[in-house]
Structures are given as structure tokens and as C-alpha cells.
Image: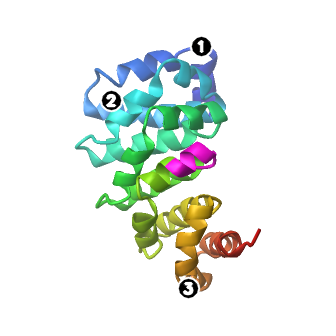
Amino acid sequence: MYGAAGIVENGLVPSLVHKLKTELDEIQELILDTLASCLLIDAFSALMAGAVPILKDRLTHESVAIRSKAARVLLVISVPLEGKNTVWSEEVIPVLVKLLEDSHPEVCANAAGALTNATITTQGKYAALGADAIPPLLKLVNSETSKVRLNAIKALTTLAEAPEGRKTLLNHVGLFQKQLNDPSEAVIRAAKIAIRVIEWKP
């Protein structure tokens, strides 16, 4: 983390963001890993440097590693409200929804994680609902990979906070109840929260 702090303090994040457009795939992977650490410290310099549209472009890259790592950076960049708003305004959410059907679990997990953060805002929720995010997320709840299950349940929980999302998910409470026997404690906790949110009555 010290290395990441040094990069942030020396104002090198914008330069890294722009190198994503020109570097070879192997170097892009290293840059994305570095950005994921740097953005935990400061996401704003990357946002100001126009990182979101560049990352969006990487979500459709032929390399599994680049797709996965770009989704991971978007997960981190959408922690602050400015990041959530930019991910929404740059129309990244529909691309993340498409990635939920990727054949590689790590890509799906990071896409679901990025959606969880991006759909905390009302506009983010409705962008995801409009992109039909619920069906692929429901499929991922049965994934063999615990990180995929966990992030899918968390994303569905944020969508259940919208009345339209809750109405759809009320038909799938049984799916979440099955996860109460999951081998992962984190998945069990997430499933309990999901059930509570879905069954909440105003």
C-alpha cells in the first residue's frame, strides 16, 4: 500500500490512466492492478483524468484479465458518490450487466461488485433495472464461486431497495433462503440482509 500512496502523493494517477490507452495488454494489467490500490486512497484524481470512459472500453476487451481488472477498478472508483454518478452518466452500468454473463467467474464477481456500488444511488438502480440486471444476477446466486454468489446477492439487495426491484425479487425469496446453508459465512450474512430488504413492507 505504501507504493500506492507514493503514486497518489506524486500525482501519477492521471498518467497511469492515460497509459491504459496505449500500452500493451501485459502492461495494462499491471496498470489496472496499481490503479485498484491507488483508488482506495484517492479516487478523485482518476475521475478527473477521465478514467471511467477508458475503463468502460476495457470491459469489452478480449483479455479475461483486463475485463476482470477493469471491473475491479470500477468497483473501487464507484465507492465515492462522484464515482457512482460518473459510472451512471457514462452509461457503464449496461456494460457491467452484460459482463454478468461472462464465462469467467472473476469477471462476473467484479462486475457484480461494481454494480453493487454503482446501484446505491436511485439513478444507478434504475439504470441497472432498465438493463435487466436481475435475471443474470439471480443465476449468479447459484454460482460455484463464493465471491460470485456474495457479490450477486449484494447487488440484488441494492436493487431490492427500489419498489420495482423488490416486487420482482419477492418471487425469488426461496433462492435466498437456500443460501442460508451456504458454506461461506459472508454469503449467509448477505442472504439474511437480502431477505430482510426484499420482504420489507412500507
- Above or below for 198 versus 37: below
> Residue 55 versus residue 172: which sits nearer the camera?
172
24 or 195, which lies in front? 195
The residue at 29%/23% (across/down) is 23
| Real-space CA distance between mark 3 and mark 2, rounded to the nearest whole angstrom | 45 Å
Q: Which residue is mark 1?
A: 10
Number of dots carrying numbers: 3
Q: Position of residue 138 (x, y in %)?
A: 45, 71
Q: Find disc 2 in the rendering and name its residue.
A: 27
Q: 162 or 44: which is nearer to us?
A: 162
Magenta stretch, residue numbers: 119-126
Q: Is residue 129 visible?
A: yes
Counting residues from the start of the chain, the first of labels 3 and 1 encountered is 1
Amino acid, disc 2: Ile
Q: Secondary structure at mark 2?
A: helix
Three-letter amino acid code at the position of disc 1: Asn
Residue 120: say if magenta: yes
Kindly indicate whether the residue at mark 2 contacts the one at mark 3 (C-beta within 8 angstroms): no
Q: Residue at x 55, y 59 (%)?
A: 155
How would you rate the neighbour count of disc 3 (Cα within 10 Å): few for under 14, some for 14-19, many for 20 or more?
A: few
